[in-house]
Image (cartoon, rainbow, N blue to C red):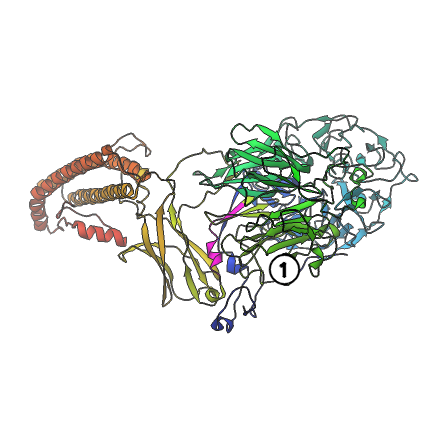
Amino acid sequence: MTTTFFRRKELCLSALIFSAMSLLSCPAACAQQSIKFDAATISGLPARNIGSATMSGRIAAVDAIEKDGRFTVFVGAASGGVWKSVNGGTTFRPVFDRQAVQSIGAVTIDRSDPNVVWVGTGEAWTRNSVSVGDGIYKSTDGGENWTNMGLKDSEHIAKILIDPRDSNSVLACATGHLWNDNEERGVFKTTDGGKSWRKVLAGANGSTGCGMIAMSPQAPQTIFADMWDFRRQGWTFRSGGPGSGLFKSTDGGDHWTELTASNSKGLPEKPWGRIPLAVAPSNPQVVYAMIESKNSALFRSDDGGQTWNRLDASRFMVWRPFYFGDLIVDPKNENKVFRPDLGLLLSVNGGQSFSFVANAHGDFHVVWINPDNPNVIFTGDDGGLWRSEDGGTRWKHQLNLPVSQFYHVSVDNANPYHVYGGLQDNSAWVGDSSYPSGVTNSRWENVYNGDGFWIFEDPADPNYIYAESQGGEIGRVNRHTLETRSIKPSPNYNEKKLRFNWNAPIHLSPNEKGTIYLGTQFLFRSRDHGQSWERISPDLTTNDPEKQKQEESGGVTVDNSSAEMHTTIYSISESPKNGHIIWVGTDDGNLQITRDGAKTWTNVVANVPGLPRNSWVSTVAASRFDEATAYATFDRHTYGDIKPYAYKTTDYGKTWSSLNVQENGVLGYMHVITEDTVDPNLLFLGTEFGLWISCDGGGHWAQYKASNFPAAAVRDIVIQPRDSDLVLATHGRGIWIIDDISPLRALTPDLMAKEAMLIEGPPAVQYFNANGGWPEGDETFSGPTRPTDAFITYYQKGRHIFGDLKIEILDQDGKLVDTVASSKHRGLNRATWSMRLKAPIVPPAATALFAAAQGPRVLPGTYTVKMTKGDKVYTEPLNVVLDPRATYTVEDRKAQFDLAMKLVKTMAHMSYGVSAIEGVRDAANNSASRLSEKDPLRARLQHLAEECDKLRSKIVATKEGGGITGEERIREHLGQVYGAVNNYEGRPTDDQAARAESLAHELEDIIGDFRKLADTELPAVNAGLKKKKLPAISTLGEDEWQKQQQTGTSAKAGAAEIREVD
């Protein structure tokens, strides 16, 4: 059955009435109103990506162009979208995030107009975990905006060629569906820039598509195409068949001829599989083809495909042809050929022999060589993007592409907590959820090799981690020494094998610390950290022998990596409410439950309505709130059905109800469902195309579309219960965190029916002013740390358009503390408050005073958030608390705050004093300039100005020298003390308190000297100015000066009323 994408529709539920049958209670008043629940409702809570890019992820396509001194690079990630660099790879940014899919198969820049970029979606390296696309896209503004140009049912596109003579003439190599037959596969051509397409080369059957096309820009009318017959199923894979063949066109792709023994000499016997192809750019007669057959080898033609010579057939040259499907010839040397494979292979003798050249990750897929300077090369593998500047001898890893492909994620309860995750072909890692300088690559640590899957902290002993690689290779890792002990169970005597899924499940008991489960065809349990295992079930799968022939998998070339292991347990869940209840889901469609501690098992899958047979159980999850309740998601994409399936039972599986995912427009096959830790009605779905949220127990769903969150596959979801953070494992864009999801728990029908509402959140923690980390440069990724500000979340039924929308913070006495910026979107909005008062006022000087750049943080306590929306006012309390890690007391904190505020007051007084001194000095100089040089009053005014400057130089640094002169005066000393006190919020040291006091006295001595100077000189000076009909030197009192600072109308203070500030 052929399944195409549902049309993406806005969940504009104008008819959405949460009735009494809804899982959310709703008063009659709510039922009278129309409530809109869609992406805008929920997406106001931002997400942050913590990477990492150390391990990065599989790169499927690269194209670049160097023009007019600008080196532009486009990178297509296997499941992480399109990234663009305008500086040769120093920095990248994602440019495809607004599209509905993130799997990329091809990227091609139009070399005649680099603003035109084509992208084929759907990776063409068709491993078991490959994602799908929705056609071919075009950008005419350098990747800023994209238009889907068709081929929406192709699912996988391997290559795009642009005719260098005519940019409107484009060929697309559509590989087609991986799991089922479809029509939209083969070679397609447009001559009108993508407005229309016609199939110019069709496969011999519904399982044959285009594996690769190649041409030389010197002879664009001659094109070679690999037509590849292939099929993947959940339990096997076939590369090759009667449809596979090598084709040639000599008229730009309009007509094709298959190359066979009758018209092309030297080709091997069929059947063939995949055929990586390349035409030498410098010599169109030279063609390379790595033909998968019973005797796979590299072939070369020197006459445009009429005759072929068999060349290298070494082991790694022919390794896994379905996965390594490319050849690349140096643009200026027809005998220099790269073969991406397990390693990156290079031949410099025309394909006679190859050697490994890249000291890099491995599993290479793509190479781009600069046609103007072939020493500059990019290559992409399962571990990211690499760059060489010496023709491929040495390589540099581009550590700035966070396209890591996580399968699973877990968290611990440290503060800040750690994130644990396993990645496709990139091991298992532990990273910080937060770090003062940002979550950089260096904050992640590799703890277990292989393809990473499940990884958890041992809840019985946090010094250890359970981690797993492909095929059930489970180990217990010492967190500190990284010593690893294998604890994988083995088959019994004379037992053929244990069937471990590629992604075999590990499950930690929520009821017994130290108890873990592991799934094969049997359920295993260990109560002693893996020292011993007991089988607690019979074979819970269908045990279908026809799905257990993995040793025959591969097609023309045998390929059995355990990725196709089937009839296995895939999901395990012990009820948190009752440890005797255990759920098990299998990849071949069984859904089993035991209610007596594994003594007996019941398969309840037949009770699930509307579910096709043999559907892969991607998740079964026991409810945290009710032992009879569980959730299950099913994945049928391995049958060519990418629709979502999700269900719920409340009676131990006797009956199941649909969670309405298809009816609500949820897109993509299902990976995971997670129930909130607090509100049973709040559910999260991870699908191949993003995150979906329900606030009414599954009645209605909306896609999460925060501005920076792409529609990447969400493979796993976990909630950190203390912080209420939602942690997402994406397969292609790393780990994402939505900080504090508690506002989602407040989205009841009552609240959503209101025009607006402030939502009370958890206490705002004043996290330490901590320092750490080190700048790692622009070529490395850095993810944002958790915000140190207080969250202020509010809901609006509609976008705010007319009138003010103002958010103010009031203290316990109702006094205004701060005003914070707000957004006006419909749905949830999140503002932040720094919990700081204004920075101190400091006088200008020759040096910067960085230590005084931040104001003091307010004291813990209960504040009020006041939101004024037009003529309506809303208020909610905001509880500010100390960092729970703090060893100091609230009394210590108050001592710190009091000293900081005293210093703020002293610096304000200093600023007024300097302003007053400068006011008199400037006025004196100005008046003197208007008098003749012989006038005695002029000399007196100049003397007054000089004396003012002397006093000013005792308060502030005056030596000019680029801002850092080493000169320190009272201003600089006060700034140092203030910075030290403000940075640490425990009790200040005795020295700090004493220093603050002594500096205040020193300042007052100088201001006193100025007051004496002013009292002595100004009366006589002003009398003389009056006689000459010149303005007197006016003065400004400190109170008035302070008001001007608050209103932003500050002026020089003058000197008349210098008063000490108590």
Q: Secondary structure at mark 1?
A: loop
* Quarter in which the C terminus is drawn: top left
Q: Is residue 661 above or below residue 848?
A: below
Q: Is residue 1049 left or right of residue 87?
A: left
Q: Residue 910's image quarter?
A: top left
In front of the other: 566 or 925: 566
Q: Position of residue 953 (x, y in %)?
A: 20, 35
Question: Does 746 lie within the magenta span?
Answer: yes
Q: Position of residue 364 (x, y in %)?
A: 68, 35
* Quarter in which the N terminus is drawn: bottom right
Identify the residue position indicated by label 1 in the image.
661
Q: Is residue 110 left or right of residue 176?
A: left
In front of the other: 830 or 313: 830
Q: Position of residue 697 (x, y in %)?
A: 56, 60
Q: Is residue 826 left or right of residue 109?
A: left
Q: Disc 1 marks which amino acid?
A: Val
Q: Is residue 71 visible?
A: no
Q: Position of residue 230 (x, y in %)?
A: 80, 45
Q: Residues within 10 Å of mark 1 (few under 14, many from 20)?
A: many
Q: Residue 227's image quarter?
A: top right
Q: Is residue 643 above or below residue 1012?
A: below
Q: Is residue 758 visible?
A: yes
Question: Does 874 lie within the magenta span?
Answer: no
In front of the other: 480 or 975: 480
In front of the other: 622 or 12: 622
Residue reaching furthest to the right: 262
Kindly identify the residue that appears in the image at 81 percent across and 29 percent down: 313
Q: Is residue 777 above or below residue 244?
A: above
- Range drawn in magenta: 736-747
Report the number of discs: 1
Kindly identify the residue that appears in the image at 57 percent across and 65 percent down: 12
